[in-house]
Image (cartoon, rainbow, N blue to C red):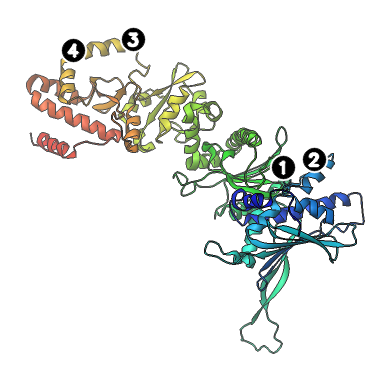
């Protein structure tokens, strides 16, 4: 019995209990090692035509003996190499092989510890290996930290066969699952589906049993049989040329990989070469995932290194605003930790993420330009996420994202970009006008929009709760300031109109103050409106907090000693016949005027879609006024 050349027990305990987060990883590690061994022989075959190139990796499960075997016909190992690579933990034959090659290799077994992950599931491991060109084979055998033996043995052909004697089933884990055909097939598809060499296994199948004596009308009999079957697809879609992949192939890959029954609305497939090299295949779903706007949703792309799955959901590759994107990223430039489960450094990952974000923005712009109808559909489903990205983190990404966002146009009656709006602005128009509300239909009926419509100005309707935060973050677009339809000054009055409005306001100042006081502090001010045409009254807001913002914060139900409230202003239409009624009541019946004031205020709240504090009082007032 030979002893490991390092502090064996401590390091093996670390391998088994700390480095790997789940036991099933061992199969990925052993398959990756087998692939590396074949890679080495394949490299030799470039200059040696005698090498048999029918490479494959084979998996066998024996339920009676409770053994699992992984075999390859790669380069194999001599006794000395078994001693060096398996007798010394963290000694990597692959790393040594790579250092000898002038050209960059895609071998990923760089640390020499993946093999020992098998001790998580096995209490004994046998490795029989015959080096390419050697006449004899050798067997390495170990039960763990106690040590190992190396003896000479027989083996037909070059390569390595690893036999795992599985641990007994216990209360914490069922090791027998690694003997089940369906489970092994699932692990190969999950972790090693894109290993370039065939991974084969005897698979149970069924077929119609031959029956020469079968009579007409009799049911067919079926029989089971086993057949050596390739488990992995080998060449991933993203490694193929775009010109060689059909839309249906992309759609099938997406549906199978990400468990969606619909085809994606858009596919992005590209190779990036530069500081960090990577390939990406990204999909935009045709609809938002059911849990997309819930805290439980986990964004992220599948991360591969040379076709081997490293992370199923790498969140760091996508900013939150693109969290709806599904797909894979494959790079040979990643620095992996010794378990190959996580990244050793995040510098390469950050570089990929930065490059990926720029590429996604570029591809979305192309999407908008090339297929606007589909882009509009996509934006209706998932655009809220991009709007969120504009104002998130104090607008750090607003310049990159502002060209991607869309709003509903009052004149076009469809989604438009900010650039499209500005390109249609009137010659003397100073502002980009917008209005917020619960739905496009409700916004269109807001009294605050009457003047803008009357003068033929286009208004951007903003029904999403984030919309006003977006324009507050942007502030301007192409040097044009955003202006709410409820703003105090819309910049549309002439000097003469301003003077007339001022005079009329002064004439009715006492009545306005009376109405304000009658509303018990609900409004900051009552004033004449220059924006109203058909409605008698409306609510606007002074200050930074708009009516829509108050609604948003109230809906969030955040506990605060100081609730976010708008400084409400009740505007009255001097040209409406009700205004003359108010003036008459102020002179003759101020008690009734108080009732009218409260009714106008509540009606304005309802029009805005805001909550009424006391509906019963409103109904009572309505009844009293109607009875007079």
Q: Nearer the viewer, mark 1 or mark 4?
A: 1
Q: CA distance from mark 3 to mark 4?
A: 19 Å
Residue 533 can be seen in this image = no
Provide residue 594's location: percent of width, then percent of height.
Answer: 13, 26
Give the labeled residue for mark 1: 332
Residue 397 can be seen in this image = yes
Residue 236 vertical placement versus 213 (above, below): above
Residue occupying the point 55% across, 47% down: 285
Between residues 23 and 547, which one lies in front from this camera angle? 23
Q: CA distance from mark 2 to mark 3?
A: 75 Å
Give the labeled residue for mark 2: 104
Provide the secondary structure element on which disc 2 rests.
loop
Q: CA distance from mark 2 to mark 1?
A: 10 Å
Res. 495 mark: 3
- In the figure, is residue 535 to the left or right of 548? left
Mark toward the start of the polypeptide (3 vs 4): 3
Crowd class of label 1 (few under 14; some 14 to 19; many from 20; radius 10 Å): some
Mark toward the start of the polypeptide (2 vs 1): 2
């Amino acid at each position: 019995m030979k002893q490991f050349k390092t502090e064996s027990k401590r390091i093996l305990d670390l391998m088994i209990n700390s480095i790997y987060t789940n036991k099933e990883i061992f199969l990925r590690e052993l398959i990756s090692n087998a692939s590396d061994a074949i890679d080495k022989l394949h490299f030799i075959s470039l200059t040696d035509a005698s090498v048999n190139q029918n490479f494959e990796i084979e998996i066998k499960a024996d339920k009676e003996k409770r053994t699992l075997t992984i075999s390859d016909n790669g380069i194999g190992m001599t006794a000395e190499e078994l001693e060096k690579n398996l007798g010394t933990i963290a000694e990597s034959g692959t790393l040594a092989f790579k250092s000898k090659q002038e050209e960059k290799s895609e071998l990923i077994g760089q640390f020499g510890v993946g093999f020992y992950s098998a001790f998580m599931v096995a209490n004994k491991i046998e490795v029989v290996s015959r080096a390419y060109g050697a006449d004899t084979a050798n067997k390495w055998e170990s039960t763990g930290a106690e040590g190992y033996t190396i003896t000479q043995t027989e083996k037909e052909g070059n390569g390595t066969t690893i036999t795992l004697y599985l641990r007994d089933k216990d209360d914490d884990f069922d090791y027998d699952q690694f003997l089940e055909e369906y489970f092994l097939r699932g692990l190969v598809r999950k972790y090693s589906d894109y290993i370039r060499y065939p991974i084969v296994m005897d698979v149970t199948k069924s077929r119609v049993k031959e029956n020469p004596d079968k009579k007409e009308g009799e049911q067919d009999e079926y029989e089971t049989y086993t057949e050596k079957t390739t488990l992995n697809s080998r060449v991933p879609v993203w490694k193929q040329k775009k010109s060689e992949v059909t839309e249906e192939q992309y759609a099938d890959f997406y549906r199978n990989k990400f468990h969606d029954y619909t085809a994606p609305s858009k596919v992005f497939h590209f190779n990036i070469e530069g500081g960090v090299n990577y390939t990406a295949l990204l999909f935009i779903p045709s609809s938002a995932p059911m849990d997309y706007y819930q805290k439980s949703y986990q964004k992220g792309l599948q991360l591969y290194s040379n076709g081997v799955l490293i992370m199923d959901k790498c969140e760091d590759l996508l900013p939150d605003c693109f969290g709806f994107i599904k797909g894979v990223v494959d790079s040979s430039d990643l620095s992996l930790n010794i378990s190959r489960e996580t990244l050793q450094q995040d510098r390469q990952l950050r570089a990929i993420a930065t490059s990926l974000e720029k590429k996604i923005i570029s591809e979305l712009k192309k999407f908008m330009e090339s297929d606007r109808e589909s882009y509009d559909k996509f934006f209706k489903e998932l655009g809220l996420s991009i709007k969120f990205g504009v104002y998130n983190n104090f607008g750090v990404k607003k310049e990159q994202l502002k060209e991607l966002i869309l709003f509903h146009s009052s004149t076009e009656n469809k989604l438009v970009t900010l650039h499209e709006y500005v390109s249609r602005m009137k010659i003397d128009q100073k502002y980009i006008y917008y209005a917020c509300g619960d739905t496009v239909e409700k916004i269109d009926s807001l009294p605050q929009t009457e003047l803008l419509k009357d003068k033929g100005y286009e208004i951007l309707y903003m029904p999403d709760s984030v919309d006003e935060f977006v324009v507050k973050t942007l502030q301007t677009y192409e040097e044009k300031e955003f202006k709410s339809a409820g703003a105090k000054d819309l910049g549309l009055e002439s000097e003469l109109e301003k003077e007339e409005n001022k005079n009329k306001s002064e004439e009715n100042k006492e009545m306005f103050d009376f109405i304000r006081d009658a509303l018990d502090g609900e409004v900051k001010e009552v004033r004449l409106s220059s924006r109203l045409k058909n409605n008698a009254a409306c609510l606007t807001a002074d200050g930074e907090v708009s009516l829509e913002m108050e609604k948003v914060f109230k809906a969030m139900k955040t506990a605060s000693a100081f609730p976010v409230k708008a400084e409400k202003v009740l505007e009255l239409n001097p040209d409406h016949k009700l205004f003359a009624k108010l003036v008459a009541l102020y002179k003759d019946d101020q008690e009734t005027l108080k009732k009218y004031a409260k009714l106008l205020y509540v009606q304005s709240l309802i029009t805005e879609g805001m909550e009424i504090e006391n509906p019963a009082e409103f109904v009572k007032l309505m009844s009293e006024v109607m009875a007079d």
